[in-house]
Amino acid sequence: MKQAYIIDGVRTPIGNYKGTLSAIRTDDLGAHVIKALVSNNPQIPKEAFDDVIMGCANQAGEDNRNVARMSLLLAGLPFSVPGETVNRLCSSGLSAIIHANRAIKAGDGDLFIAGGVENMTRGPYVMAKPSSAYGGDSKMYDSTFGWRFVNPKMASLYGVDGMGVTAENLVAKYAISREDQDTFAYNSQMKASAAQKSGRLAKEIVPVEIPQRKKDPIVFKDDEFIKPNSSKEILAKLRPAFKKDGGSVTAGNASGLNDGAAATLIASEDAVKKYNLKPMARIVASAVVGVEPRIMGIGPVKASNKALEKAGLTMEDMDVIELNEAFASQALACIRAWGLQDDDPRINPNGGSIAIGHPLGVTGARITYSAALELQQTKKKYALVTMCIGVGQGYAAIIENVNV
């Protein structure tokens, strides 16, 4: 069976909701990272890519009708290169990478671009058609985030708890204190701030030019969601966002609504030799699982355990653990279920989504490439990449540094 390797990757800076990237169309963001990745690997002919696979969780606006295909054409790839958009909500970017991995292992191709794109700011309002000719039962939803057009059967089976409420459910189930959540969030901000100041995050980023009326473009090059001046005192003053009475999940200890794009280059050993590529990491194993939707945030535990078992490895073998921080309570529930310390230095060494941001279709690709890069920087061997998924799933992948 063929092996799949992570060769390279890029991402945009992560933008705030209604922030610097809000003026850029989703398909243009996707095109930007694809074009940059291709430019960084000029020895590969543009027509050589077997597929471009991009994750995207919304797909109700400018990201409609297969944004991967739109983006690759806008990036200047020939029309002979196909494109596919995948949607597994929060893990869409990781799903795209694993799709490429599976295709290589199955012999369906040797060279793929895989990543994700999301502009949550530009998620449109959506409205269903009435169910009858003169019906007045149409409802409008903001497609940026959360449930819409819910099937009543689903509501009766599993409820329709919003993501913040599922985080509160984990607080109750695992007795996670507000102080511990805020401490975790603060540490994420400090790690991300340090990584930004040191230039570590810049190693992942391709700047974006933001057009200005009658002025030169602004060059956007740094993640803008990071809050270097955060403190535990500031976090403690924030009100609960999802459960007014007795709630503890706040805007400060949760990830945000964000904009961005990321792309990775995934290749087989044949492509590595043919185009003289230098692999960063090998994709060792992956696993996806389902969990109770009301506690969707615990999904990484089962998924990671399954991936580790498939790889014949243990959590102790992992040198880097990129655990997506949808919420501090969710991350802490997983960390403690694994029997790890809250501040285990292997976990999100450069900060996580609470600090950097969480554009839904992007994060899986961002943290996978960041993990591969971290293994190179530290000369360590194994990394676990894992994330929870709305409506009750978990995804995990294990990668191995091939240069140690």
Image (cartoon, helix red, strand yellow):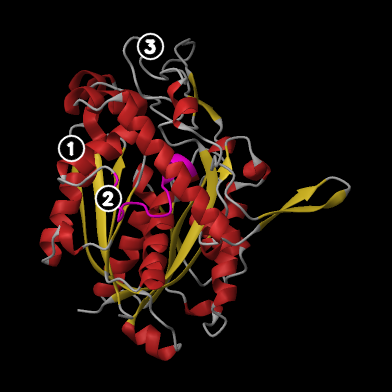
Q: How far apart are marks 1 and 2 (CA)?
A: 25 Å
C-alpha distance separating marks 1 and 3: 26 Å
| SS class, disc 1 | loop
Residue lying at 42% horizontally and 43% vertically, measured from the top left: 188
Amino acid marked by disc 1 = Val
Residue 16, magenta (yes or no) = no
340 displayed left or right of 108: left
Q: Earlier in the sequence, mark 2 or mark 3?
A: 3
Q: What residue type is labelled 3?
A: Lys
Q: Mark 3 points at which residue?
A: 244
Q: Residue 291 carries which label?
A: 1
The magenta-colored residue range is 343-355
* Residue 207 makes an appearance in the image: yes
Q: Mark 3, residues whose alpha carbon is within 10 Å: few (<14), some, or many (≥20)? A: few
Q: Residue at x 42, y 61 (%)?
A: 370
- Give the image location of residue 311, x and y in percent: 15, 66
Q: Closer to us: mark 1 or mark 3? A: 3
